[in-house]
Image (cartoon, helix red, strand yellow):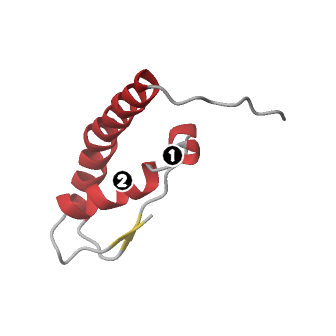
């Protein structure tokens, strides 16, 4: 596979920041809130969270962002592994 040379311009960097912010919002709203509510209702610790999908697999920061946000939303006595 041949990769093209990428020249970073002001527009490229702005676009990258916008996509990062959208990714952060997606992590916070779509995944973490739902997962943390389910974990709290189950009430078991430690908990292993299994996630599948192309966003989780291919996004460079999604796993770290998701783990961090879920940990922030849960009480300190619940441990989560993903």
Residue situated furthest right in the rendering: 1
Q: Identify the residue at horizontal 57%, vertical 47% (top origin).
A: 57
Q: Position of residue 20 (x, y in %)?
A: 37, 37
| Residue at screen point 40% across, 25% down | 10
- Which label belongs to residue 56? 1
Q: Residue furthest top?
A: 11
Quadrant of the rendered structure where residue 81 is? bottom left
- Number of other residues with Cα within 10 Å of mark 2, as a class: few under 14, some 14 to 19, many 20 or more: many
In the image, residue 37 lies at what x, y percent? 22, 52
Local crowd size for mark 1, using a 10 Å CA cut-off: few (<14), some (14–19), many (≥20): some
Q: Which is more N-terminal, label 2 or label 1?
A: 1
> According to the image, label 2 marks what residue?
66
User: Do the residues under discs 1 and 2 have CB atoms within 8 angstroms?
Assistant: yes
On screen, residue 61 versus residue 14, left or right, reads right
Residue 46 vertical placement versus 11 (above, below): below
Find residue 49 and report its horizontal and vertical position in percent: 43, 60
Left or right: residue 15 versus residue 77 is: right
Most foreground residue, 53 or 16:
16
Q: Nearer the viewer, residue 79 or 42?
A: 79
Residue at 19% across / 78% down in the picture? 77
Residue situated furthest left in the rendering: 75
Q: Quadrant of the C terminus?
A: bottom left
Mark 2 falls on what kind of element?
Answer: helix
Q: Please, is residue 45 above or below residue 62 in the view? A: below
For mark 1, give the secondary structure: helix
Please provide percent x and percent y for residue 66.
Answer: 36, 53
Check the picture and name the quadrant holding the N terminus: top right
């Amino acid at each position: 596979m041949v990769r093209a040379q990428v020249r970073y311009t002001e527009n490229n960097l702005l676009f990258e920041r916008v996509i990062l912010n959208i990714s952060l919002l997606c992590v916070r709203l779509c995944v973490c809130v739902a997962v943390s509510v389910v974990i709290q209702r189950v009430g078991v610790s430690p908990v292993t969270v299994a996630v599948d999908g192309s966003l989780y697999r291919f996004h460079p920061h999604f796993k770290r962002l998701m783990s961090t946000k879920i940990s922030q939303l849960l009480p300190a006595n619940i441990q989560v592994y993903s």
